[in-house]
Image (spheres, coloured by chain):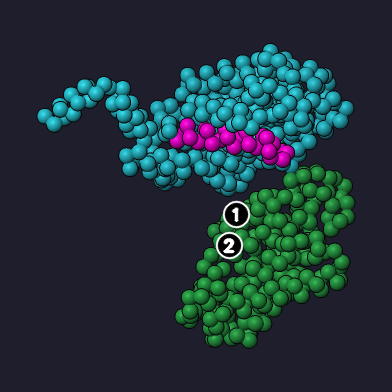
Chain colours: A cyan, B green
Amino acid sequence: MADDFMQSAAPYFRQSDTQIYSTVQRISALCILLPLPLIHYGGRVILMVIFGILTAVGAEALWNYAAKQKQTLYDMTAVETGLACALLMPACAHYQLVIFAAACAILIGKMPFGGRFRTPFVPAAVGYCLAAVCFPRETFTYSQLNENVTAKLFAFQYNDSLTPAYSQLALLRQGKDPFTHINEYLLGELAGPLGTTSVVLLAIAAIWLLVGGNLAWQCVVSFSAAVAVVSFAVPYHTTSTFMYIAYDLLGGSTFFSCLFLAAYPNYCPKTATARSIWGAVCGTLAVIMQHFAAAPAGEAGGIFAVLVMTPFSDAFDRMVWHFRSRGISYRTVKKSLGQKLRYRMKTQQERELDEFKETQ
Amino acid sequence: MNSRRHSRSSLLVDYGATTGVKHPMLIHGAGITAVAAACTSAANALTLSVIMLLLCSGVAMVYIFERGEYVYPMLGVIYFTVSSFGACVCATAVNFLSPGTAASLGMYLPLLAADPIVLARIQPDSPFVSPSDALPSAVGLWWMFAVMALPIGIIREILGKGTLFGLPLFFNPDVGGMSLPFAGLIMLGFGMALYNRNADEV
């Protein structure tokens, strides 16, 4: 009984939904991203997802068994992590990569810190980043669309005969213009990780999460705004103004990391103001990494930025609480500015009348 | 056992001599770096272990001379100087015996001079050890280092290069990140967790 309760640091927040309900909803949101990859790449996608989920579940079960702790598989966070790891991999990635990413996500990113929601990092981000650092070629080489990847359904080795395709970010970093059409973004006809290329599916998943209350929309808005602003300020010179903002936000796994990693309510800050600030910092860091960092951080700047910033989410909450305790908050600043604006817009007679009323 | 009691000293000397003791994270970071960044192969780990043995023994000799009864204001400086000199001599000797071995360790070799295992004598809570026990104690500290460093080096070489002491194995996972410091830090963390788990059970 004593092990069921752990005192956590203030502030405390209450959520009406159970944690299992939230996780199941997030899993369903991730499943929304599967149809188009299935159409483009065939049944291999299902196998990758299965490998990812089985590895994550098995790793968590093994850890709990070795540590002589009660099993925590019922919360299904391992399923979510395995599914996310699979969706972040290219379609032509060999299965060992998915297994490696899922295993690292659980055994390094989750269980050593105490399990679900006690870790300072999003486990899927840890698994992906470790896979990207250890196997950069396999993680960032994509197959051509509709290439016969299904023929390699049971291929366990990386296949050099595949014609490599490069993501928009990779082409931009090479000084080339991707010449991507808006249709390709909508239908996911791009080179990229499985679940990150279709804007339509990502938007549907975002709406699904928002309706279910499992999306920190302040993070999404501020992240996207920051990406747009910083992209505008630090443009790629090979393409037009509007498109490089689209490339930075929608290319690669940036938007996926914004929705499913940065806007994860259990890992991002809890107050709205802190979420907005934190999301903006994440977005800024993501673009800076995409533009200036060496591979692999440059290819997956969004995920690396979220990985770096997630441990600081509590710090942003405390910063907001610190200022609120001193009377500085969004509401007070808004009220003060509103009063000043109303005062300035009044005529001289109205001001004198107000001052006379105050003296009465 | 009695802990060492430092004498009062001037502010400048105290700051210069015991900065490392006052900032244990800095010292421990310097010590961990040698394992995390340099133990990328079994040969490197073995070289570091040999040098650590010589260093620990040299510092133990200083301790025997000091006898633990004379508390110098410059105690930390003395041990730092001895360990730095010892690291330089050991590296030269190792390089003479096996050319290129010390050079492959790069800048991480001098950090052994600031390893908390080597500087254990100047810690405020270090136990008092008689001169006859100083050398066995040093060997014990070296053993603790070797137990951590050697498996890390072996595993990183097998997974990263598919070799063991330079000899190719029948498989090569080619995990590129094994040569990076984060892999060593992660393995150190798991090693410490295993040690704590076994210690709790005992």
Residue at 71 percent across and 56 percent down: it is B37
Extent of the magenta region: A274-298
Q: Is residue A340 above or below residue B105?
A: above
Pick out the residue farthest to the left. Answer: A360
Image quarter of the C terminus of chain A: top left
Type of residue at label 2? Answer: Leu
Q: Quadrant of residue A305?
A: top right
Task: Give the chain of mark 2.
Answer: B
Left or right of residue A78, residue A184 in this image: right
Helix, strand or loop for the magenta stretch, by majority: helix
Q: Quadrant of residue A256?
A: top right
Q: Quadrant of residue A55?
A: top right
Pick out the residue farthest to the front. Answer: A348
Mark 2 burial class by Cα count in 10 Å: few <14, some 14-19, many 20+: some
- The tag on residue B193 is 1
**Helix, strand or loop for disc 1:** helix
Q: Relative to the observer, which residue lies in front, A317 or A37?
A: A317
Left or right of residue A146, residue A21 in this image: left
Q: Relative to the observer, which residue lies in front, B123 or A58?
A: B123
Is-magenta flag for residue A276?
A: yes
Task: Give the chain of mark 1.
Answer: B
Residue at 43 percent across and 26 percent down: it is A17
Residue A112 horizontal/vertical position (percent):
58, 46
Q: Relative to the observer, which residue lies in front, A266 or B22?
A: B22
Pick out the residue farthest to the top. Answer: A183
**Callouts 2 and 1 in the same chain:** yes
Residue B48 horizontal/vertical position (percent):
74, 65
- The tag on residue B26 is 2
Is-magenta flag for residue B165?
A: no
Disc on the earlier residue, 2 or 1: 2
Q: Could you give the CA–CA distance between mark 2 and mark 1, rounded to whole angstroms? A: 21 Å
